[in-house]
Image: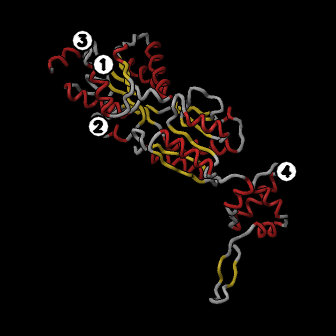
Amino acid sequence: MNRRIDQQEGTSVRSRVTISDVSDALGLTKSTVSRALNNYSDISESTRLRVQRMSEKMGYQPLSYAQAIRTGRTKSLGLVVQLSDHDAHRPFLAAFLAGLSQGASDEGWTMTIATADSPEATIDTIKTLIKDRKADGFILPRTLRHDPRVTVLRDADVPFVLYGRCHDPAGCAWHDILGEDAMRDAVRHLVKLGHVRIGFINGGVQYNYSALRLEGFLAGMKEAGLTTDPAHVKSDAMSIEGGEAASLVMLSTDTPPTAIVCAVDMAALGVYRTAADLGLTIGADLSLIGYDGIPEGGMVTPQLTTFAVDHTASGRRLSNLLIRRIGGEDIETLRELVPATLQERGSTGPPLLTSTELTARIALLD
């Protein structure tokens, strides 16, 4: 770091290292140093590494505004959080944002995070960020089956990466969790325990993950040679209240399931309420599996068996993928699918009651 002498105080004061300082130290032209720092293809790898090491040693930092003018990039990744979503403030959002920030910082990028209170406001906010050049690309969480955010960004030719997948994959890069495999594996787990009547409570049908998780559940049932009772499949349960209502209907049928798989943990927590109201013991009279791995699942009794997702790791990967997408990497190389991790706890076990006995137990409590 260069120093200058403050004439009034007579003290040594640090001044900002410039690109000229780096070029002088290396005996290279400013143009060569600049092109090396910006990874131009006409600069050899050995020269690029020399420049990078000297820049780090001297503490050189390019002026972000000047760099944005030169490259047309702000080196910022955009994210719009829609506050009207049912779980916009859930604990996993903090882990997700931490992962995004870590991933961006590791590459010398920053995050531009905005909020919106409706789907329409989300679109308007994305358009404003594009117009004001506040972000070079966007991360789109909670993808919809037909997502207007994707349409806007495609039309504007702005890079984006999905945390999820969508119905039309054209031009889409993504990082997603194999929720469909988790639902199939949930059925396998319950079948091994001896369950043959298994229900399924899905999330919001507008989200792409719901279609995938339903497919996974149905595939698991078919693989096991089991019949899926339409009365035992419910949708749009994304909250405790939603899971409570769906499971009450399901368990009030003439032949209720002895086990239930939930596409989201929040709905599974609602099943605990229903079971308590009906005098049933989770893990004994009724087995239950969720998906998400939220902390609350470990706070109920018995603890919820669930498929956990590392949202911090996902955030880091999404930042990396988006930076590579902005850099022009082929979309086909920017599609990642990773498994969720089963956390087997006390909410699952062998069926102690048949479906008929379960019906009789519930009837006695009416």
For numbered disc 2, what is the local secondary structure?
Answer: loop
Tell me how far mark 4 sits from mark 3, CA to CA: 76 Å
Can you identify the residue that label 1 sits on? Answer: 258
Q: How many marks?
A: 4
Density class for disc 3 (Cα within 10 Å; few <14, some 14-19, many ≥20) is: few
Tell me how far mark 4 sits from mark 1, CA to CA: 66 Å
Can you identify the residue that label 2 sits on? Answer: 300
Residue 33, percent from left and from top: 80, 61
Name the kind of residue labelled 1 in the image: Thr
Name the mark nearer the viewer: 4 or 3.
Answer: 4
Which mark is first along the chain, 2 or 3?
2
Residue 232 appears in view = yes
**Residue at figure coordinates x 55%, y 39% from the top left:** 140
CB atoms of marks 4 and 1 within 8 Å: no
Which mark is first along the chain, 3 or 1?
1
Density class for disc 4 (Cα within 10 Å; few <14, some 14-19, many ≥20) is: few
Task: Point out which mark residue 356 bears.
Answer: 3
Which mark is first along the chain, 1 or 4?
4
For numbered disc 3, what is the local secondary structure?
Answer: helix
Can you identify the residue that label 4 sits on? Answer: 42
CB atoms of marks 4 and 3 within 8 Å: no
Q: Nearer the viewer, residue 251 or 126?
A: 126
Name the kind of residue labelled 3 in the image: Thr
Which mark is first along the chain, 3 or 4?
4
**Residue at figure coordinates x 76%, y 52% from the top left:** 39
For numbered disc 4, what is the local secondary structure?
Answer: loop
Q: Is residue 8 above or below residue 123?
A: below
| Quadrant of the rendering where the N terminus is positioned | bottom right
Q: Nearer the viewer, residue 239 or 184?
A: 239
| Quadrant of the rendering where the C terminus is positioned | top left
Q: Nearer the viewer, residue 69 or 343?
A: 69
Name the kind of residue labelled 2 in the image: Val
